[in-house]
Image (cartoon, rainbow, N blue to C red):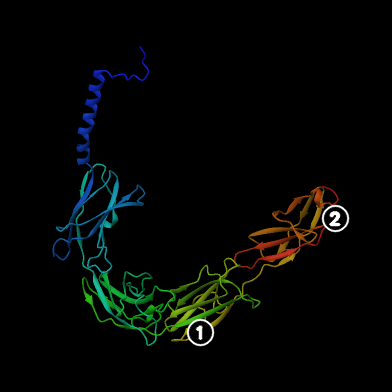
Amino acid sequence: MTIRGRRHAAPVSFLLMAMTIGAGTLAAMPAEAATAPVAHGTVTAAEGSGPIVGITVCATHRNARGDYGAQRCTETAADGTYTIPVTSSLWSISAEQRNLYGAWLPQDYNNRKAYSFATSPSRTFNFALVRGATISGYLSPPESGPRIDYTHVGAHRVGSTGKVDKTATSFSNVSSDGYYRVAKLPAGTYKLLVDDGYSPVGYANQWYPDAAAASGGERVTVGTGQSVTGRDISLSLAGSLTIALHSPKGSSLKGDLRVYDVDGRVVYVGDGDYTTAHTIVGLHPGVYKVRASPYDVSGYQEWFSWKRTFGTANPITVTSGGTTSRTLTFHYPTIKATKRPVVRLDANSIVTSHAKWNVKPRYVRYEWWRDGKRIEYEGWDWRLARKSDVGHRFKVCQFADRSGYADGRTCSDYSKKVTTY
């Protein structure tokens, strides 16, 4: 009798054991799911108006160092409750209304403290959200000015020392009819900045009501949940500024450029443009200062004109509807050689001495030449003579680099003809 293709049945005892194990596994699964850790709670209004629906509550994973990881989020139900399944590890909980014009301020539970769910499968995190304040008004463009519905209005908090925050606490887009409403503001004092997110920029920086820098803007103070209206802003016709960059010898030079208002706040960044002339449009009429860096001179910066600090830089006035042009000529120093290198023939090697410089270089690069032709891929201060070198003469050029200086260059005379290798 052949046994090819025959299936052997398992013993009955084995099948009964497998069924028992499988049944035990299946029975254990619901119990394990039931004990999965969760974060839950209720979100209500701190003012006592009851639960808040539609608030996004997020659990953020944290590692032992406190770093932030993946999030698990949900929205509160009609009764303000929420439940988020998590894992047996560290999590921090936060609540926010994900609406730019929402009424409620975001809140991190216990200042983003991380809570462990390893021993506590269920933790309760209740939130009492504070109603945010609002500031609103209308923007009106100047006659023949660019459109305003690409602009936005940001509220920058004023600190106890009078310093204005660089970033806005909250902002509002501007509708086609000019209306704006900055919402979700904590109680405090603010200054309003009109800025343009469109290109070409129409209005780069006007502080309420009509200033080119925050120091000239008016303060707006709001209380908890207060709505301040009527902060209307008449936009001024912007001007433009063109800065041409020149080398110390007067030739056009590529470089980076930054424009600052009189408070020292950056209003334009031209890093990486590498152009010889920068034109900045949409500037509110006022006074500015300019700092530039030449593309090929690392570590060197200069303020207009021939100044090294913001405080001593010469101001440039931009007028409404006009174009102001200036030339910034750099005055960076150049590394100079005080002693040229010498090439000598040493047995089967061609060696150069090291040039002397007026300042100590950061590093020196070597460039070898053979009878008027550059030799590629050889950048050491010596090279082995080859058969093809016999009968030829060599020279070396050395290039010195140092931060804040233009590179220095010097070359040796040609050596004697190579006779051996």
The reply, left or right, for residue 350 in relation to residue 220 is right
Relative to 359, residue 164 above or below: below
Q: Secondary structure at mark 2?
A: loop
Residue at 27% from the left image edge and 43% from the top image edge? 88
Relative to 188, residue 349 above or below: above
Classify 10 Å Cα crowding around label 1: few (below 14), some (14-19), many (20 and above): some
Q: Which residue is mark 2?
A: 417
Q: Where's the N terminus, which quadrant? A: top left
Q: Which residue is mark 1?
A: 324
Tell which of 180 and 257 is nearer to you. Answer: 180
Q: Amino acid at mark 2?
A: Lys
Which percent across, then down, holds residue 325? 53, 83
- Whether residue 21 is visible here, answered yes or no, is yes
Which percent across, then down, holds residue 343? 79, 57
Residue at 46% from the left image edge and 74% from the top image edge? 268
Residue at 25% from the left image edge and 73% from the top image edge? 134
Tell which of 214 and 372 is nearer to you. Answer: 372
The reply, left or right, for residue 128 in relation to residue 7 is left
Residue 321 sits in quarter: bottom left
Which percent across, then down, holds residue 172? 31, 72
Q: Amino acid at mark 1?
A: Thr
Tell which of 65 and 369 is nearer to you. Answer: 369
Which percent across, then down, holds residue 271? 51, 69
Query: Hey, which residue is sitting farthest top in the picture?
Result: 1
Classify 10 Å Cα crowding around label 2: few (below 14), some (14-19), many (20 and above): some
The reply, left or right, for residue 232 in relation to residue 342 is left
The reply, left or right, for residue 217 in relation to residue 252 is left
The alpha-carbon separation of the residues under discs 1 and 2 comes to 60 Å
- Whether residue 157 is visible here, answered yes or no, is no
